[in-house]
Image: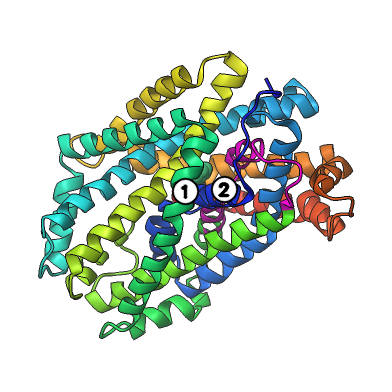
Amino acid sequence: MSAAREHWGSRLGFIMASAGSAVGLGNIWKFPYMAGANGGGAFLIIYLGCVLFFGLSLVMAELAIGRATQRNPVGAFRTLAGRGWSVVGALGVATAFVILAVYVVVAGWTLAYVVLMANDTFAGVDVEQSRQVFSSFTSSTFMPLLCAAVFTVGMVTVVIGGVAGGIERVAKWLMPLLFVLLIVLALRSITLPGAGAGIDFYLWPDWSKVGPDTWGGAISQAFFSLSLGMGAMITYGSYMSREQNLPRDATLVVGLDTTVALLAGLVILPAVFATGFQPDEGPGLTFLTLPAVFATMPAGSLFGMAFFVLLAIAALTSAVSLLEVVVSYFVDEKSLSRIKASLLCGLIVFALGMPASLSQGVWSDYTIAGKNFLDAADFISTAVMMPVGGLMMALFTGWVLGPRAVSAIQSYSGQPMPLAGLWLFILRYVAPLGIGWILLQGFLG
Ligand code: PHE
């Protein structure tokens, strides 16, 4: 199986695909509302700390595990340390399904917004009307399901196309375009009348707003945004060649992802204040504020369409990496063909996405621990499963692999890995204690 394993077509292709996995709804939909709900600037600083202290080291750890074993997450752990540890991989596969249930629903909203923009629905709307459009769409029954289905079909199609043919080709062209558009929008947003309060809120930390939620929110956001803790990076690393400079490329991917999140905050939060929304609006934030911003721009509908098209594509390149985790598991471990595995997993994802979508409307009364199905799936996957997975991966790489992980990383050159000691120290102590402490706060709080 490993002899015939596909590989990325080029180094750039790997970087773009991994950045494509990292950059997604997490950066543009989630990061702004998380920052908005958790104290703005203070959240930003804690988030950056999480990325720097745990995120980068864990991205490297996952890529190294994948590259060294050339396996899906379950197979990777089993190859390195036997059956016991493969539970971590299995947790990752399960996590991917839960995240995807949320992902296809929100990505479906993005597709719907492309159409709404194209129809000029938001011309001249104010805040209340924008809210009206959002809530009447998301709470309806049929259209959101249809949009989620369209997205699911797109995602399955790309994954059937395979690593270099499908995923890489899409990511390489469209990520740079999204980046440019975000810069344009940030310029528009910060020059809106009244945007100053939002810029202050976003860049000026107010420590009085920091509580256990801020920490928990920041760490789960870092995991989510970097596609960490559930094996996506293991899977992508498994298609990486041994000649690639892993630390350098991992740093680049983390840097790109973080830059896009910061930019998205700079687009949304100033606009929130300028248009009169509240920053703690929650998951609707991006969908509510942006149309109001586009309404102030010349050719706003066009910009709006372009934006939601690119956001849908960013979501696609992330969803594809999530699906790739489960598909590579079924291909490697259950000997399904790629096509069969992709179709089967696509169906499961849609079946899980259905209650998540309906929970915004007709099924809103069904709750799990007080949360509707969408919120519950989001919470369980990002606030519990991913940090737990990440914690296990840090322990595994730091303690079980130890120096073996370092030699796996330096395989691209004869040179010793720079800062190898610091990397292991972070994986052994800083990440497990930090993540463990934050998780504990969440349970106690
Ligand atoms: N990182 C993606 C985002 O920010 C989500 C994701 C999570 C993708 C886990 C793959 C694995 O939207």
Q: Nearer the viewer, residue 381 or 417?
A: 417
Please state the horizontal and vertical placement of residue 33, each as a whole percent of the image: 38, 61
Mark count? 2
Please state the horizontal and vertical placement of residue 332, each as a whole percent of the image: 61, 20
Q: Residue at x 70, y 31 (%)?
A: 70
Looking at the image, do the residues carrying marks 2 and 1 touch, with CB atoms under 8 Å apart? yes
Q: Residue at x 15, y 53 (%)?
A: 116
Q: Residue at x 26, y 47 (%)?
A: 111
Res. 224 in view: no
Please state the horizontal and vertical placement of residue 233, each as a whole percent of the image: 61, 42
The tag earlier along the polypeptide, 2 or 1, is 2
Location of residue 405 (image quadrant) = top right
- Per the model, the C-alpha gap separating discs 2 and 1 is 8 Å
Question: From what the image shows, is residue 379 above or below residue 256?
Answer: above
Location of residue 325 (image quadrant) = top right
Please state the horizontal and vertical placement of residue 367, each as a whole percent of the image: 32, 36
Quadrant of the snapshot with the N terminus: top right
Question: From what the image shows, is residue 367 above or below residue 256?
Answer: above
Left or right, residue 119 beside residue 284: left
Q: Secondary structure at mark 1?
A: helix
| Residue at numbered disc 2 | 13
Task: Decide whether residue 129 is among the magenta residues.
Answer: no
Label 1 beta carbon within 8 A of ligand 1: no
| Residue at numbered disc 1 | 171
Left or right, residue 432 beside residue 327: right
Q: Nearer the viewer, residue 135 or 256?
A: 256
Q: Residue at x 21, y 47 (%)?
A: 112
Question: The residue under label 2 is which amino acid type?
Answer: Gly
Residue segment shown in magenta = 218-246
Question: The residue under label 1 is which amino acid type?
Answer: Ala
- Neighbourhood count class around disc 1 (C-alpha, 10 Å): few under 14, some 14–19, many 20 upward: many
